[in-house]
Each structure stands twice: as structure tokens, then as C-alpha cells.
Amino acid sequence: MSERGAQGRRLPAAVRAALVLAALSPHAAALPDDNRQPIKIRTQEAIRDETKGTTVYRGDVEIVQGSLVINADEVTLTQADRAARPASDSRDPLAGSNVMLIEARGAPARMQQLPEPGGELVRARARVIEYFQAKALIRLRNAVRLRQGRMEMDAARMDYAIDRQVITAWANPATGQRVRTLIPPERLPGGGEG
């Protein structure tokens, strides 16, 4: 364990992050058939480049797949060969794969997904939202905020593995931004009881 991880002042933030991840994860699965639904895109402009295999959508872009909705200023849809890119993280679940990538950018871009019928919406915003449809992975980068009901998490980067129901959040050591979590009393063990 590093010196920073061993310091007492770091423990509460780590505990809070673990609690919110545990609290969000069981409720963060998408509706079972979302990934089998067609992807529908509405926008003001679309430019297809066959030589690059990309389509760029601009102007009030809305992407819908089942209960998943992404809104952005600009979206690029491309077939991405991850093996050709330098791997910055050897644990990248997409390394060595050929996946369809939907990259949404905005100030901020927004997404929402219904975890289960009658459940609370999971809502997120970030400057960049990447959706790796074949891998059921949403990667949020830059000024990320995720909410479900009154629960919140802020981070520099967040991965939302839809099928596995796992949310992983990272701080930004360059700016000193840490993962921040808020768990309302009703989500804590014994919370909300009178």
C-alpha cells in the first residue's frame, strides 16, 4: 500500500467511494433487452466518410437504444480497432478488439438509462461519453457526474460496465480532483429509520 493510501485522511474517501459503488452497482444494470434494440440517431447534420468508416453527427444529437438515451452537441460513430492504438492502460477491457465506438461530446454530453422497470433512472453527464456497444461499456471522461435518485458520484473518469453491473471511477492526480460521493441516509444500512 502506498503512503498516500495508508494515511488516515484518505480512508474516508476510499470508504465512501466503495460504499457508493456498491450501492449503485446492483441498481445500475440496464433493462435486459436494451442492447438488442436498434440504435436510433436524430440530429441536424450527418456526414458519412466511407474511406474512414465514420459518421459525424452535429447539432442537438440524440441517440436512443432501448432505455439508453445520449444527448450531445456532436457524435462520431466509428469502427475502432483498439489493437492499432497504443494501450495506455494494460487492463483496458477493449484492448485488442474491433468494436463499434460511439463518441459523444458536449458541454456537457448527457446520458440516462433505466436500470429496471419501475426503478430510478441512472443519469450521467461528462464532456465526453464513449459507448462501446458490442462490449456493453460506457466510458465517461472529463467532469463526470453520475446520479441515481439522491445518490451522486463525481470523478475525472468513470467506466459503466452495463452487463456486469460494475461502475469504476478514477480521480485526476494531475489536477488533484478526487472521486467524490454522496450517499443519502436512506441508502445506508439502518438509514432512514425513525
Image (spheres, grey):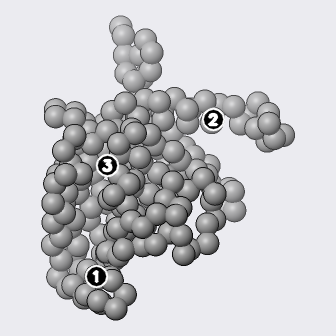
- Distance (Cα) linking label 3 and label 2: 23 Å
Which of the marked residues, 3 or 1, is nearer the chain's N terminus?
Answer: 1
Q: Position of residue 186 (x, y in %)?
A: 37, 21
Residue 41 vs 25, above or below: the answer is below
- The residue to which callout 1 is attached is 55
* Residue 67 located left or right of residue 110: left
- The residue to which callout 2 is attached is 14
Determine whether the residue tagged by mark 2 lies in a helix, strand or loop. helix
- Distance (Cα) linking label 3 and label 1: 26 Å
Residue at image position (35%, 67%) is 100
In front here: 94 or 158? 94
Q: Amino acid at mark 3?
A: Arg
Residue at image position (65%, 31%) is 12
Residue at image position (36%, 10%) is 193
* Quadrant in which the C terminus is drawn: top left
Q: State yes or no: discs 3 and 2 in contact (Cβ < 8 Å).
A: no
- The residue to which callout 3 is attached is 123
